[in-house]
Amino acid sequence: MKLSVGPLLYYWEREQVFAFYRMLASAPIDSVYLGEVVCSKRRAVKPEDWEAIGRDLADAGKEVIFSTLALMEAESELAALARLAAGSVTIEANDMSAVQLAGGRPFVAGPHLNVYNGPTLRLLGALGARRWVPPLELDSAAIAELLTERPQDMECEVFAYGRMPLAFSARCFSARVRRRNKDECNFVCGEERDGLTVYTREHEPLFALNGVQTQSAQVRNLLGSIGELQAAGVQMLRISPHSHEAVPFTEVIEAFAQAVRGDQAVQCPASALPGGYCSGPMFETTR
């Protein structure tokens, strides 16, 4: 089983982004997803910067994939997507416009394409999908059933660690909570490097606001379910970036790497984010 690091979902300072990917160059992972998935206004890291980061990671032996926006709202975003898809890079398509612009070349079918049945999975395979990331609401039984209907050469990659992306909206909730409109947000999403936690009236962590994206407050952690995932036919696990220095991201990667190598006793470091760990709809146990 292989490991990947998913696209950076948060708005970090430019130097923090570069430092993060320099660290990944020597990490025990196979694939890295680059680019902006959440909001096209986030331009601290420019397209040419992503390309340079990708070259460095490829030189370090990593597979590099460029992720696309999950919510396309403007012609300018579609034009930027067309430029990316016309290049020589492999893309992760998170919107059907990206599938069309891929033009039949190999791509990764991202978790935001909402694939829930075999015919859709086979259609994407015919259009060039060589890897599928199931939507996060699918449980292990549903994924295992769908994998019996996938094209023979299609891999399956499961979101195994991180705050779960739940929904996108045309409205920016990070700006709204600070009484700002979306066009004059001043990038307030960057003030919370792992999203702004939303609590219930009982002060229990429920969601995290990340610009136009809503996430779970809890962190999905499937470290204890790797055996079940392998049995279901999953070939790759995705680890989603976080920033907390209290729990270095390298320690999370190393825990998953040890588990993939067969260490059944390895434990993930405790989550520093409110809400702790959960398994989402996948399994009942985490560690």
Image (spheres, grey):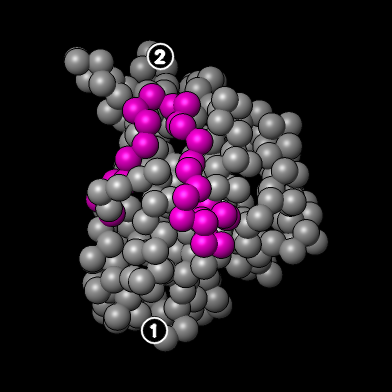
Is residue 50 visible in the rendered image? The answer is: no
Query: What amino acid type is highlighted by mark number 2?
Result: Arg
How crowded pointer 2 is (Cα within 10 Å; few <14, some 14-19, many 20+) is rated as: few
Q: Would you identify the image quadrant in which residue 86 lies?
A: bottom right
Q: How many marks?
A: 2
Q: Please identify the dominant SS of the magenta region.
A: loop
> Residue 96: x percent and y percent?
39, 64
Q: Which residues are magenta?
A: 256-282
Query: What amino acid type is highlighted by mark number 1?
Result: Pro
> Residue 215: x percent and y percent?
36, 37
How crowded pointer 1 is (Cα within 10 Å; few <14, some 14-19, many 20+) is rated as: some
Q: Residue 151 has which mark?
A: 1
- Taking the image as shown, residue 272 lies to the left or right of residue 179, namely right
| Residue shown at 79% from the left, 54% from the top | 56
Is residue 162 visible in the rendered image? The answer is: yes
Residue identified by numbered label 2 = 178
